[in-house]
Image (cartoon, grey):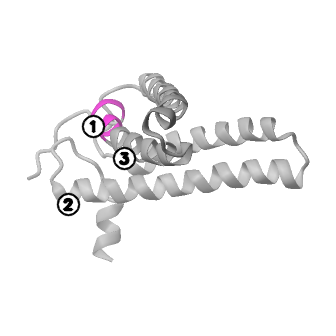
């Protein structure tokens, strides 16, 4: 029970290793939820409702991005003191990160398989893992960071 209270606890700028671990768990849980939203909505639209797959992917991706942003803001990085930047600036920064991530993924999966002589899927999985780690740091320090440093510790 203490673990669940810790995982759901608020974020502070001066987080210790236990708090960072809680943030990491919440970050991973949010990512899992978003993956389910993306895959389920795309599949349901395409397979159950007969929507063209390209349109289904667009709708699923949009739902996933909106869900991801909301979970990052309200679950992963929630804090009692508010955020250092406004919602509008969070949206702008978040979409900048998402767009950059998309571009890096496209570039890496287009170029690296030929250079490294590996399957595209291997590059994709490695890229996704690296970008997830980078996103954790970027979101924590530049998008969803608290307004004031914590007095705790």
Q: Using the numbered discs, state the Cα–Cα distance from disc 3 to disc 2 in whole angstroms.
A: 16 Å
**First along the sequence among labels 2 and 1:** 2
Drawn side of residue 126 relative to residue 21, left or right:
right
| Residue 82 seen in this snapshot | yes
Q: In the image, which is nearer the foreground, mark 2 or mark 1?
A: 2
**In the rendered image, which residue does mark 3 sit on?**
78
**In the rendered image, which residue does mark 2 sit on?**
18
The magenta span reads 137-143
Q: Residue 40: image x %, image y %? A: 71, 55
- Taking the spot 67% from the left edge, 52% from the top edge, the residue there is 39
Q: Using the numbered discs, state the Cα–Cα distance from disc 1 to disc 3 in whole angstroms.
A: 8 Å
Residue 146, numbered circle: 1
**First along the sequence among labels 1 and 3:** 3
- Taking the spot 37% from the left edge, 47% from the top edge, the residue there is 78
Judge whether residue 141 is colored magenta. Answer: yes
Q: Secondary structure at mark 1?
A: loop
């Amino acid at each position: 029970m203490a673990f669940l209270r810790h995982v759901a606890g608020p974020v502070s700028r001066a987080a210790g290793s236990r708090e960072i671990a809680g943030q990491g768990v919440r970050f991973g849980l949010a990512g899992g939820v978003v993956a389910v939203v993306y895959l389920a909505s795309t599949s349901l639209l395409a397979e159950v409702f007969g929507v063209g797959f390209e349109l289904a992917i667009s709708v699923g991706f949009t739902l996933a991005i909106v869900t991801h942003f909301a979970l990052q803001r309200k679950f992963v990085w929630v804090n009692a003191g508010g955020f250092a930047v406004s919602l509008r600036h969070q949206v702008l920064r978040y979409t900048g990160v998402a767009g950059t991530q998309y571009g890096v993924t496209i570039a890496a999966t287009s170029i690296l398989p030929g250079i490294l002589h590996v399957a595209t899927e291997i590059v994709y999985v490695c890229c996704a893992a690296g970008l997830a780690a980078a996103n954790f740091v970027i979101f924590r320090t530049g998008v969803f960071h608290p307004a004031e440093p914590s007095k705790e510790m």
